Image (cartoon, rainbow, N blue to C red):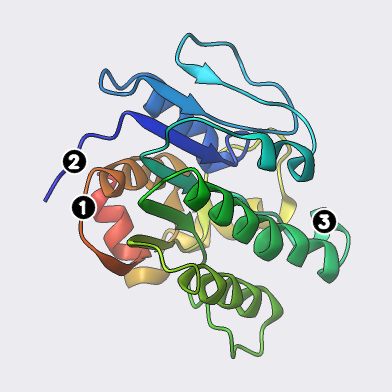
């Protein structure tokens, strides 16, 4: 079953995937409002509302109708500076965003997680992603879509050396572990936003690539 969301709440609009998705949303004729809070200002658009500042301050202040909430928040331990700072973004901030979106009336939450996310993982990164998924499930969303992309490909404003080295190899890996272009992921997220089915849906990277063609 398909729906036509008109009011979107988007987190992570300044990131690699979020930038592509925001551009897509603002060019969709059915979208009348995109509420995209961020730490730094976004380019102005008649359908964009962009509260700027500290999420701890602006999250409780967000208001208005929301049909679908999409969360593209994410960092790395290196960029965050520590495991604790990484968890504060990739778990705590994502969960707080989900809670506020639910309070605003959103029925459907789409979140970008990670391949192999597992709360019992021995790898810190995938363990935190799994714990984040677990916390969002506990919010009892009518519809929760968890996207688990593999290695993200695309040009960042601040290039990451490890990604530049790994990207060519990631394109050669078969199945769900093959790298996925951020623009493909953004297209897939929009297609998932149009689908209406109750419960939790986990979408692995190979399916995301197919949806994003």
Residue at 72 percent of width and 49 percent of height: 160
Residue at 54 percent of width and 55 percent of height: 98
- Residue density around tag 3, few if under 14, some if 14–19, many if 20 or more, within 10 Å: some
Give the quadrant of the C terminus.
Answer: top left
For label 2, the residue is 3
For label 1, the residue is 196
N-term mark: 2 or 1: 2
- Secondary structure, mark 3, is helix
Provide residue 26's location: percent of width, then percent of height: 41, 21
Pointers 2 and 1 in contact (CB under 8 A)? yes
For label 3, the residue is 80
Provide residue 211's location: percent of width, then percent of height: 24, 50
**2 or 3: mark nearer the eye:** 2
Residue at 70 percent of width and 54 percent of height: 75
Q: Nearer the viewer, residue 57 or 76?
A: 57
* Residue 89 located left or right of residue 190: right
Please indicate, yes or no, whether residue 145 appears anywhere in the rendered image.
yes
Q: Quadrant of residue 40?
A: top right
What is the spatial separation of the Cα atoms under label 2 and label 1, in whole angstroms?
Answer: 6 Å
């Amino acid at each position: 079953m398909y729906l036509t969301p008109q009011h979107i709440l988007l987190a992570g609009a300044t990131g690699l995937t979020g930038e592509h998705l925001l551009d897509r949303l603002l060019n969709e004729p059915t979208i009348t409002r995109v509420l995209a809070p961020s730490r730094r200002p976004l380019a102005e658009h008649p359908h964009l509302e962009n509260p700027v500042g500290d999420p701890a301050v602006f999250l409780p202040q967000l208001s208005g109708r929301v049909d679908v909430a999409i969360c593209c928040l994410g960092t790395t331990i290196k960029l965050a500076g520590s495991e604790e700072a990484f968890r504060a973004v990739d778990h705590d901030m994502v969960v707080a965003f989900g809670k506020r979106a639910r309070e605003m009336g959103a029925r459907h939450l789409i979140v970008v997680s990670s391949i192999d996310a597992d709360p019992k993982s021995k790898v810190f990164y995938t363990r935190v992603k799994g714990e984040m998924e677990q916390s969002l499930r506990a919010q009892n969303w009518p519809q929760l879509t968890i996207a688990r992309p593999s290695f993200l490909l695309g040009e960042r404003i601040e290039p990451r050396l490890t990604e530049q080295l790994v990207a060519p190899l990631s394109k050669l890996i078969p199945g769900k572990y093959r790298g996925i272009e951020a623009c493909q992921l953004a297209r897939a997220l929009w297609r998932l936003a149009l689908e209406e089915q109750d419960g939790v849906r986990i979408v692995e990277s190979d399916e995301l690539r197919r949806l994003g063609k």
